[in-house]
Image (tube, helix red, strand yellow):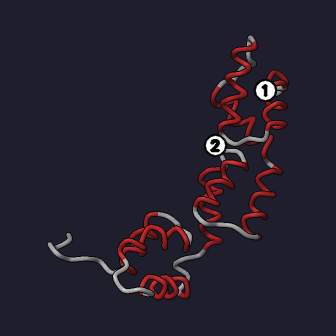
Amino acid sequence: MNTPGFQPSLKGRALRLLSQREHSRSELERKLAPHEEVPGELAKALDELQGRDFINDGRAIESVVHRRSGKLGAARVQQELAAKGLTGEAVAEAMAHLRDTEVERAREVWRKKFGERASDANARAKQIRFLMTRGFNPEVVRKVVQGADEDC
C-alpha cells in the first residue's frame, strides 16, 4: 500500500490512529511528535482535526470508561485516563459514576474469576490481591470478599 519513500502527513497519521480507537489530543501529540518536521505543523493538524470533531476528549473518556470499567476499579481507570492526558471536570464526573457502581462491578469481576467464597486465609488473600491489583477500593474489596457467600 505504501510506496517506497512515501511518508503520510501528520494529519493522515492522526486519522489512522483515530480510526482504530478514540485518542485524546495529548495522546496524539505524544505519538506524532517524532514525525513532526516543521515546528507547529503538528499543532496545526491537530487543531484542524479537533475543529472538525475528529478529536474529542469527551469521547475518549467515554471510550476508556466503557472498555475498562467492566474489568477494573475506578482507581485503575482514572490512572489510564491520566496516562492518556485526560483530566478535568469530565474525568471527575466519570469517576464519580464509577465509584457509585464500584461494589457491583467488583462483585461481578470476583464472581467471574472465583465464584465461591475462599476456603482459607491464603485463598482469601489471593482474592483480595486480585481485586486490589485491578484498582478496586480496599473497602469495596473487603465487602466483596467477606460477603461473597451472601450473594452467590
Counting labels gives 2
What element does badge 1 sit on? helix
Image quarter (top left, top right, bottom left or bottom right) of the C terminus: top right
The image shows residue 133, relative to residue 36, as above or below, that is above
The image position of residue 86, as x and y in percent, is: 64, 66
The image shows residue 99, relative to residue 26, as above or below, that is above
- Which label's residue is closer to the chain start, 2 or 1? 2
Amino acid type, label 2: Lys
CA neighbours of label 2 inside 10 A, class few (<14), some (14 to 19), many (20+): some
Mark 2 highlights which residue? 71
Q: Residue at x 49, y 82 (%)?
A: 46
User: Which of the two residues, 28 or 36, is positioned nearer the viewer here?
Assistant: 36
Query: In this image, 21 relative to 109: left or right?
Result: left
The image shows residue 85, relative to residue 140, as above or below, that is below
The image shows residue 100, relative to residue 22, as above or below, that is above
Mark 1 highlights which residue? 145
The image position of residue 27, as x and y in percent, is: 52, 67
Q: Residue at x 68, y 29 (%)?
A: 129
The residue furthest left is 4
Query: In this image, 20 relative to 68: left or right?
Result: left
